[in-house]
Amino acid sequence: MELTIRKEKLIFKQPAKTSRGVYLTKNVFYIERDTPQGKEIIGECAPLEDLSPDFSQEYHSKLSDLLHQIENDSWSPTPSWKQYPSILFGIETALRHIKAGGLAHTDTPFSRGEKGIPINGLIWMGSHDEMLRKIEEKLHDGFRCLKLKIGAIAFDSEIDLLHRIRSRFSAEELEIRLDANGAFSFSEALGKLETLSRYEIHSIEQPIAAGEPEKMTRIVRETPIPVALDEELIGVYETEEKRSLLETIRPHYIILKPTLHGSFYGCDEWIELAERIGILWWATSALESNIGLNAIAHWVSSHGVERPQGLGTGELFTNNISTPIYRKGAEIWYHRS
């Protein structure tokens, strides 16, 4: 089996703004194999250059080394590769594709085209009017769970958006999730969370920057809004490290991104550890193309989830790869041919 790598630049339809900056393009590394019909994409490595712990100038050579091991049937997800989560994600995606004989990596109601996966409507950061327009579009499309990225415009403007939403929809009618991407300082975080809590917020991701577990622990203990960890999980590879972080901070939720959090191999471990102590979770894609999104959706479906997932990135790019994944209302579906 000969596998090759093709680097591709995905182009955003609109600038994707977070508190860390603005994305205009996104580099991905497709794993391909030869078939009688030509090259077939079977895996995707999609590192986020500002977040992925395994991204470096040697990224391509590391990926090539792994592919060489697979071609010689000498690779397994050993601990030595835990520090390369986005590479592991591409490899695991490729191996699942090979084992399943196609894009349907699992045998679930989702992979059989019988049931969709509920998803949240993602509202990227923008001006007040831009975000309000996007909110209206998502509500029109039938979304009853919205995730708003906050922290890049004036806090008063963000409060105004939440006020407008809640004046129309109660918490029973519409779930609101917030993602601060670490935008709040520790000194202001609890005060802002108190203000936000007036709008019946379901949860807030990463209110302060990762890497200060003592401060995050205090926020979780005192917050009026359930807290979810995301960036805090990046770079935590060993089982005991994971257990210690979860037992120390005790977040209400963890947000799992296979590209950042150890691929499916590592995320399954996060889930097992979290569920033992009553921490809930959902999965989110991390700006992968439809190849990666497809793999994540099938993996999520194997866990029998009912909670809305963050799997909507497939519509972000002008040059995405065509797959049987599609959105129908507030769910994603797999078209089984």
Image (spheres, rainbow, N blue to C red):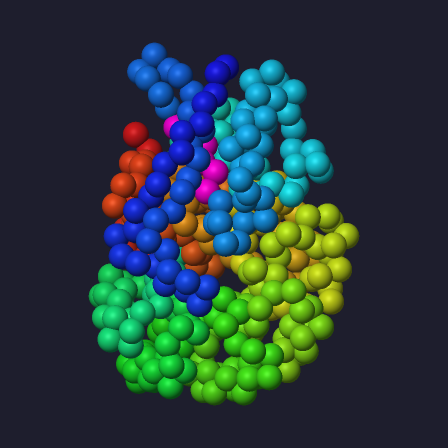
Q: Is residue 253 magenta?
A: no
- 126 or 298: nearer the eye? 126
Q: Is residue 45 magenta?
A: yes
Most extreme residue toward the front, as rendered?
A: 57
- Quadrant of res 172: bottom left
The C terminus: image quadrant: top left
Q: Is residue 279 above or below residue 161?
A: above
Which residue lies at the image location 58% right of the left edge and 68% below the top edge?
209
Can you see residue 187? yes
Q: Position of residue 49 (x, y in %)?
A: 49, 49
Q: Position of residue 275 (x, y in %)?
A: 65, 57
Image side of residue 169 versus residue 104, left or right: left
Image side of residue 237 versus residue 122, left or right: right
Can you see residue 162? no
Image side of residue 127 versus residue 106, left or right: left
Which residue lies at the image location 67% right of the left edge and 69% below the top edge?
212
| Mark count | 0
Which residue lies at the image location 34% right of the left edge and 59% below the top edge?
16
Q: Position of residue 308 (x, y in %)?
A: 43, 59
Q: Position of residue 131 (x, y in %)?
A: 29, 71
Magenta span of residues:
41-46
Most extreme residue toward the top, as rendered?
A: 36
Main SS, magenta residues: strand
- Quadrant of res 140: bottom left
Which residue lies at the image location 27% right of the left edge and 41% below the top edge?
319
- 205 or 66: nearer the eye? 66
